[in-house]
Amino acid sequence: MYLTHIPTWLQSCYPSYHWRIPTQEKVVYLTFDDGPTEEVTEWTLDQLAQYDARATFFVIGKNVQQHPSILQEVLKRGHIVGNHTFTHNNGRQTSTEDYLQSIQQTQDICKKYGNISPTLFRPPYGRMTWAQIQEVKKLFPIVMMDVISADFDLRKEGEECTELVCQSSQEGSIILFHDSVKAFPRLRKALPEVLSHFARLGYRFESIPVLPLAHV
């Protein structure tokens, strides 16, 4: 069971997280988790290019290690890269020490292959312990989302994912997709439709901007 549109009351329970970007401008923030993935990430980049869209890719360090050239292509095309741990760690099943080590491994890998040090973090599954939150928020803005496409859900069709995103998103929404093999059958249908829908409505697609560290 999961939510596809994160209600404001739940967002308020975690005030140190960034759930959306406050704005009245027609802009949405597409984000992609779990890459880089051979073929899937490249396809995603081509779709974004058709709309001059900028996005944010929260990468898994192990995948960067396996596909460094794809990371480099993401950066070459003007997108932002965030940290998503080294092996997609579930924080609630990982010690704080190991969790922080996984994050640092990903920083090191991104520096080695992309000459970047990601400044944004997104926890896999959205799950961290309280202790992990306290440590991670000292290092990174923690970026969540207010709209989940559900492209990872094998029970759904791409049309359902499209509808979820188009109905739930608003100005400043952070929208979650996945550039993974598992999600690709639904992403292949939903992403072009979402891009077309919001472009027709006059929206821009931007990367997550520079965000402040939490003070709460």
Image (cartoon, rainbow, N blue to C red):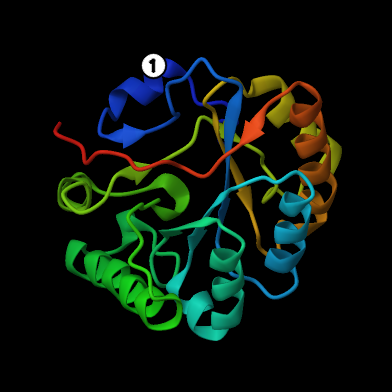
Percent x, y for residue 183?
A: 71, 56
Percent x, y for residue 174?
A: 53, 34
Q: Is residue 43 left or right of residue 94?
A: right
- Taking the spot 51% from the left edge, 29% from the top edge, the residue there is 146
Q: Which secondary structure, mark 1?
A: helix
Q: Is residue 93 left or right of residue 183?
A: left
Q: Is residue 136 left or right of residue 174?
A: left
Q: Is residue 132 left or right of residue 144?
A: left
Quadrant for the N terminus in the image: top right
User: Does residue 118 lie above or below 161 as drawn?
Assistant: below
Crowd band around label 1 with a 10 angstrom C-alpha radius: few (<14), some (14–19), many (20+)? few
Residue that label 1 marks = 9
The amino acid pointed to by label 1 is Trp
Percent x, y for residue 182?
A: 70, 62
Percent x, y for residue 99?
A: 27, 65
- Taking the spot 38% from the left edge, 65% from the top edge, the residue there is 85
- Taking the spot 53% from the left edge, 76% from the top edge, the residue there is 63
The image quadrant of residue 149 is top right
Quadrant for the C terminus in the image: top left
- Taking the spot 61% from the left edge, 21% from the top edge, the residue there is 26
